[in-house]
């Protein structure tokens, strides 16, 4: 399955968001996702399996529990693909940052008005 097919599913995206905040036991993921999306434990397990097999999540055993966390490998593939387009938006973001800084400088230099106590 292509990485963007994996991420196209809202349930899998939500699982990644949850795992992005901390490592979670499979039961915690099932509880959170089941409550939010109204799906069964088996369905959540299938989504976790897809995330594992596609390199977005890793699992480790701790006694009887299975602990899931984000695996950077899948995200690196996404980042590499997006990276080919950075040249389109980085100059625009740099120009925006320059304009914001220029506006802040101009506001600091503007004289204060006597009546309002604010800069003109």
Image (cartoon, rainbow, N blue to C red):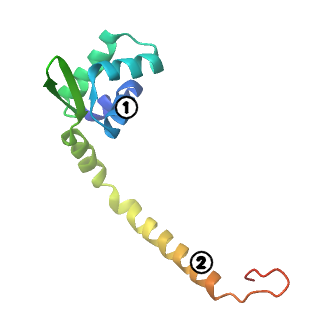
Element marked by disc 1: helix
Question: Residue 70, labelled with which disc?
Answer: none
N-terminal of the pair, mark 1 or mark 2, is: 1
Can residue 1 be spotted in the picture? no
Q: Which residue is drawn at 34% across and 27% down?
A: 12
Q: Position of residue 118 (x, y in %)?
A: 75, 80
Left or right, 113 with reference to 55: right
Q: Which residue is drawn at 74% across and 87% down?
A: 112
Q: Which of 50 and 70 is in front in this view?
A: 70
Other residues around mark 1 within 10 Å, as few (<14) / some (14–19) / many (≥20): some
Q: From what the image shows, is residue 102 above or below residue 97? A: below
Q: Which residue is drawn at 54% across and 73% down?
A: 100
Q: Which of 8 and 41 is in front in this view?
A: 41
Q: Where is residue 94 in the image (x, y as percent from the top left)?
A: 43, 70
Other residues around mark 2 within 10 Å, as few (<14) / some (14–19) / many (≥20): few
Q: Quadrant of the C terminus?
A: bottom right
Q: Mark 2 points at which residue?
A: 103
Kindly check if marks 1 and 2 are in contact, taking CB atoms under 8 A apart as contact.
Answer: no
Left or right, 119 with reference to 13: right
Question: Residue 13, labelled with which disc?
Answer: 1
């Amino acid at each position: 399955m292509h990485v963007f097919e994996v991420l196209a599913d809202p349930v899998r995206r939500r699982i990644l968001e949850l795992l992005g905040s901390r490592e979670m036991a499979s039961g915690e993921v099932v509880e959170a996702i089941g409550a939010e999306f109204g799906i069964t434990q088996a369905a959540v397990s299938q989504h976790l399996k897809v995330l594992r097999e596609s390199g977005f999540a890793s699992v480790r055993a701790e006694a009887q529990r299975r602990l899931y966390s984000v695996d950077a490998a899948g995200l690196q593939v996404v980042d590499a693909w997006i990276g080919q387009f950075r040249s389109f938006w980085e100059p625009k973001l740099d120009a925006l940052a320059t304009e914001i800084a220029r506006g802040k400088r101009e506001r600091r230099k503007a004289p204060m008005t006597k009546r309002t106590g604010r800069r003109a």
